[in-house]
Amino acid sequence: MPSSTDDALTSAASSGHVPVLLAETLELLAPRAGATILDGTFGGGGHTRAILESADDVTVVALDRDPAAIERSATIQAEYGDRFRIHQINFGDLADLNETGFNGILFDFGLSSFQLDTAERGFSFRSDAPADMRMNPDIGISAAEFLETADNESLVRAIRNYGEEKRWRRVVENIVKARGTGLLQRTHSLAELIKEAVGPTPRGRKAVHPATRTFQGIRVEINDELSAIERGLPAAFDRLLPGGVLAAISFHSLEDRIVKRFCRKMAGRPEHSGDYRTQDERTVLAKMISTRPVAPSEEEIRVNPRSRSSRLRAIRKL
């Protein structure tokens, strides 16, 4: 049984799934023998496996809403038995979990590599597939259904607010015009429709596919991702033991802003530039481990380009 961080990292990499900021996460959580860690976003299981291998008798309780993730967890279950258990729930519903007393808690927000790379899930436009984008394909409506039926307010929220697409008006207009034509049903035709609205990337800027932001916004909207983070963080903190660490990895500014404000609130600091409350009006429940987010190293970005935008923040409960 590996007992060092290096061994855990090697094992995670050999599994074919490379979790982001793994060394930094293990250093922050510092699992010790007998500890119980909550992995609120099991995904590909890379963080879970590394935590289990980082020290003897560590137990991991994992959550994931995706049925495919539950199926993938069978391998870890077979290896670690009672040291691992998983619940099929959205981490936003953590308040409903009948488990508590964790020494550390980890969230790794956004998509897993498995979701992104499985063409038929419809998260990516690299392959032509039904425009689904649901993290749990058994619940809710697909991206295509949303685009065909959503009111203007919902479309604007998804594309302007969550996708942060500057040409959102053109995109919304093209989507509404395309209703009933079949163009909203598949990833390739949807991406082309958005590309036509957004136009080419201006010269001098990094070339990113014009549909990237809108796909992100639609996904965030139909999966209620930001609300889940807002609900999940305080529920997780309530289940953390004193001295325990709550760590969260974000991949875009909207996620990171929620995490940053939560961490500052727990540490009794101003949550944002407009928070003018006096120190007497604040409650200090945690210590910020770092005032700045931890970013991936150049080496990690080289090996795993998807890690480029990841940011890790953590607090320790007092």
Image (spheres, rainbow, N blue to C red):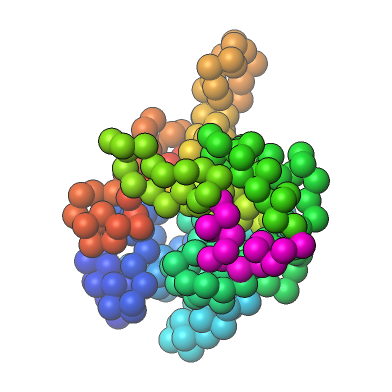
Placement of the N terminus among the 4 image quadrants:
bottom left
Residue farthest to the bottom? 78
On the image, the x and y values in percent for residue 176 come to 73, 49
Magenta residues (range): 180-194
Residue at image location 57% in from the left, 55% down from the top: 193
- Using the rendered view, name the quadrant where residue 206 is placed: top left
| Horizontal side, residue 157 vs residue 31: left or right | right
Residue at image location 55% in from the left, 45% down from the top: 197
Residue 191 magenta: yes
Residue at image location 38% in from the left, 30% down from the top: 291
On the image, the x and y values in percent for residue 282 come to 61, 20
Residue closer to the observer: 47 or 158: 158
In the rendered image, the vertical position of residue 204 relative to residue 240, given as above or below: above
Residue 240 magenta: no
Residue 98 seen anywhere in this rendered image of the structure: no
Residue closer to the observer: 318 or 315: 315
| Horizontal side, residue 299 vs residue 28: left or right | left
Residue farthest to the left? 299
- Using the rendered view, name the quadrant where residue 182 is placed: bottom right
Residue closer to the observer: 263 or 245: 263
On the image, the x and y values in percent for residue 30 come to 36, 55
Residue 9 seen anywhere in this rendered image of the structure: yes
Give the mark count: 0
Residue at image location 68% in from the left, 72% down from the top: 137
On the image, the x and y values in percent for residue 289 come to 39, 37
Residue closer to the observer: 236 or 192: 192
| Horizontal side, residue 86 vs residue 8: left or right | right
| Horizontal side, residue 275 vs residue 46: left or right | right
In the rendered image, the vertical position of residue 220 relative to residue 166, given as above or below: below
